[in-house]
Image: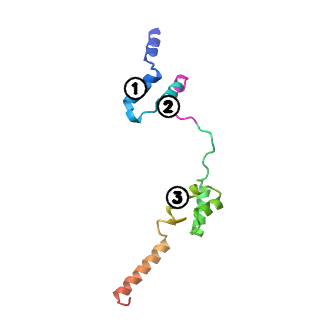
């Protein structure tokens, strides 16, 4: 029993030995020396998991389903609304509005407005009809 304890104590490394081993294995992608020392101390104090501690602060609540639905309704009712106007109406930050418009509604920013990258069905039909009318006019030489 005593030899096992001595053997276990012998295999324990110091913080600098641990850092050197990590540096040898991971090279440039290794944690910083300070971070290795910090984690070494945590494990010495009895910590067993490697998950980060929870951080204080308010969790993000802007990207809720209700806000996404409200922004979608606003955009469908008036496509000319600016990001700032939508943010003030919904009561969230304009960067969150921009991310919702970009990620959820596939829209991109043009000047201060958001426009859809994809045409709606009605817009596609109108464009198709205009092109067909133009082609017919050219073929009939009435253009």
The percent position of residue 43, horizontal first and vertical second, equals 52, 25
> Which residue ends up furthest to the top in the rendered image?
2
The percent position of residue 74, horizontal first and vertical second, equals 60, 65
> What is the C-alpha distance between the residues marked 3 and 1?
45 Å
Q: Which residues are magenta?
A: 42-53
> What is the C-alpha distance between the residues marked 2 and 3?
37 Å
The percent position of residue 79, horizontal first and vertical second, equals 56, 69
**Residue in front for this viewpoint, 38 or 53:** 38
How crowded is the residue under tag 1: few (<14 C-alpha within 10 Å), some, or many (20+)?
some
Say which mark, if any, is on residue 21. 1
Which image quadrant for residue 20?
top left
Kindly identify the residue that appears in the image at 46 percent across and 66 percent down.
Answer: 118
Mark 2: secondary structure: helix
| Label 3 or label 1, whichever comes before in sequence order | 1
Classify 135 as above or below 80.
Answer: below
Classify 35 as above or below 79.
Answer: above
Say which mark, if any, is on residue 4. none
The percent position of residue 89, horizontal first and vertical second, equals 65, 62
How crowded is the residue under tag 2: few (<14 C-alpha within 10 Å), some, or many (20+)?
few
Query: Is 49 covered by the magenta stretch?
Result: yes
Residue matched to label 2: 35
Kindly identify the residue that appears in the image at 60 percent across and 53 percent down.
Answer: 64
The figure's colour scheme reads: rainbow
Kindly identify the residue that appears in the image at 34 percent across and 86 percent down.
Answer: 139
| Label 1 or label 2, whichever comes before in sequence order | 1
Residue matched to label 3: 104
């Amino acid at each position: 029993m005593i030899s096992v304890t001595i053997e276990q104590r012998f295999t324990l490394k110091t913080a600098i030995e641990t850092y050197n081993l990590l540096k040898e294995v991971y090279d440039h992608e290794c944690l910083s020396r300070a971070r290795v020392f910090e984690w070494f101390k945590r494990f010495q104090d009895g910590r067993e998991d490697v998950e980060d501690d929870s951080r204080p602060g308010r969790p993000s609540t802007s990207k809720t389903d209700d806000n996404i639905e409200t922004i979608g309704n606003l955009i469908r009712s008036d496509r000319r609304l600016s990001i700032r106007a939508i943010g003030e109406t919904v009561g969230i930050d304009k960067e969150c509005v921009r991310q919702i418009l970009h990620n959820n509604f596939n829209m991109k920013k043009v000047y201060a407005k958001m426009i859809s990258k994809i045409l709606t069905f009605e817009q596609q039909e109108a464009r198709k009809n205009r092109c067909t009318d133009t082609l017919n006019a050219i073929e009939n030489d009435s253009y």
